[in-house]
Amino acid sequence: MIPEKSNALGLLFFLVCTLFVSCSGSEESRLSDAIRETGKLELIEMEEESTFVIRGKEWKDINSIEEGLRHLSELLKPGERIGVYSFRSYAVAYIDLTLFLNKDLSLSEDEKTATLTLPAVQVESIGRSTTINVLHERVSGSQAQITPEEKKALQDRASALFLDELKPGAALHDEMKRKGEEKAAAFFRGLLRANGFDGVEIAFSDREEGEK
């Protein structure tokens, strides 16, 4: 299970609620301005721990006959050469509220209803850990030591796979997008209901709320 971290939305909720309650005149335009000025609203942060193994030298990393022959000689050397490592990568789901338009909010004071269309939830990488956690490492006999370059190469490969998981259609991307939409919808629905709008409809610019 991928750990999930939520950023603090309480302060934003308080500020926007205070502004909304004190608004006079065009509540729609004032609230739209407040939402837009929030900028990048981070909804959830996730981390994924990747584990990779170095055992001897992987055949798929051999690029020439000469290198393959050297690998054969390594296999005949006595001893063991294995390393098990892990490191963490991080991603965030967010909404760029600078894209919010005045027409995306419609309020009805008489019916106490509100319709809100939010910008699409985006998912992006926010980096990886700078250190590699050694879970197990054993080099015995006449085997060569595992080099930092080998570890870095596998770390880069694991990072590339993680970035693939953040592309639209991948399981991790879709999970983070769904959770981000749920959190954003709950937040803005609570904001509007706290200000007297009981009937609240929320959608996202790329799809209707709840659409799979």
Image: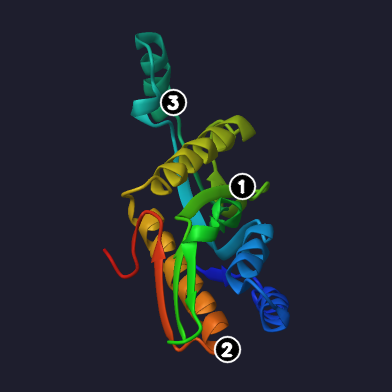
Q: Cα distance, mark 2 to mark 3?
A: 70 Å
Q: Residue 2: percent from the left, percent from the top?
A: 46, 66
Foreground disc of the pair 2, 1:
2
Name the residue carrying label 2.
194
Q: CA distance from mark 1 to mark 3?
A: 36 Å
Q: Amino acid at mark 1?
A: Gly
Residue 7 in the figure: left or right of residue 118: right
Mark 1 = which residue? 127
Task: Please state which of residues 172 and 186 is positioned toward the viewer in this rendering.
Answer: 186
SS type, badge 2: helix
Q: Is residue 160 above or below residue 73?
A: below
Where is mark 3, residue-wise? Answer: 74
- Dot 1 lies on which element? strand
C-alpha distance separating marks 2 and 1:
37 Å
Q: Is residue 92 visible?
A: no
Residue 29 or residue 57, whichever sits in front:
29
Q: Residue at x 41, y 61 (%)?
A: 204
The residue closer to the viewer here, 158 or 122, is 122
In x, y percent, where is residue 47?
54, 60
Q: How many marks?
A: 3
